[in-house]
Amino acid sequence: MRRILFFLIPLFLITTTVYSQTYTGVLTTGSYSQKGVCLEIKTQGKTVTLEMRRVRFAKLMPVKVDVEVKGLKVKFQGNNRIVTGENIIPLNDGKPRKKHKITEFKGVANADRMAFECKMGDKKVSFIGQRNFSGKSLHTMMEENFDRKE
């Protein structure tokens, strides 16, 4: 009978803290603006994920969508996070939208405000908003703005 020795090798997981901030502001696409847009940015290491809930990019757009932009790059300058991105396929309601590819993404976020501009497909999109200091989650803010008139 053979003896088999098992060596237990400790497994160390390397984790990176995710920093999350929420902002409420105005999203503009061309001449259309939507007020009360809730946006969350999650910074992990040198990458950022941006989430917007129930947004509309045109007045006649029949429904609002959830948009998630993963893989934005971040670098830190003083108290600011400089966020950039190129050729990123956003997720609308969890599905990739290649025709809305994000290019020329440039943004700045700090403890008080967030602003960005980019191209989504052939449309210029911008956001400017103030930080939410209430401690509310993006989901709670989204629910509070659900019935808001535009």
Image: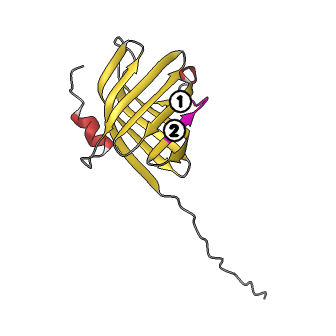
The amino acid at mark 1 is Phe
Question: Where, by quadrant of the figure, is residue 149 drawn?
Answer: top left
Do the residues bearing badges 1 and 2 touch, measured as CB atoms within 8 Å? yes
Q: Which mark is residue 105?
A: 1
Question: Where, by quadrant of the figure, is residue 103 drawn?
Answer: top right
Relative to 16, is 90 above or below?
above
Q: Is residue 127 visible?
A: yes
Q: Quadrant of the C terminus?
A: top left
- The residue at the point 45 percent across, 37 percent down is 108
The amino acid at mark 2 is Val
Q: Quadrant of the N terminus?
A: bottom right
Query: Could you say where residue 21 lies in the image, as x and y percent from the top left?
Result: 37, 46
Magenta range is: 82-89
Q: Which mark is residue 83?
A: 2
- Local packing at callout 1 (Cα closer than 10 Å; few below 14, some 14-19, many 20+) is many
Query: Could you say where residue 7 lies in the image, as x and y percent from the top left?
Result: 69, 81
Query: Could you say where residue 55 lies in the image, as x and y percent from the top left?
Result: 36, 26
Looking at the picture, tell me which residue is in the foreground, 81 or 28: 81
- The residue at the point 48 percent across, 34 percent down is 107
Q: Residue 34 magenta-drawn?
A: no
Dot 2: element: strand
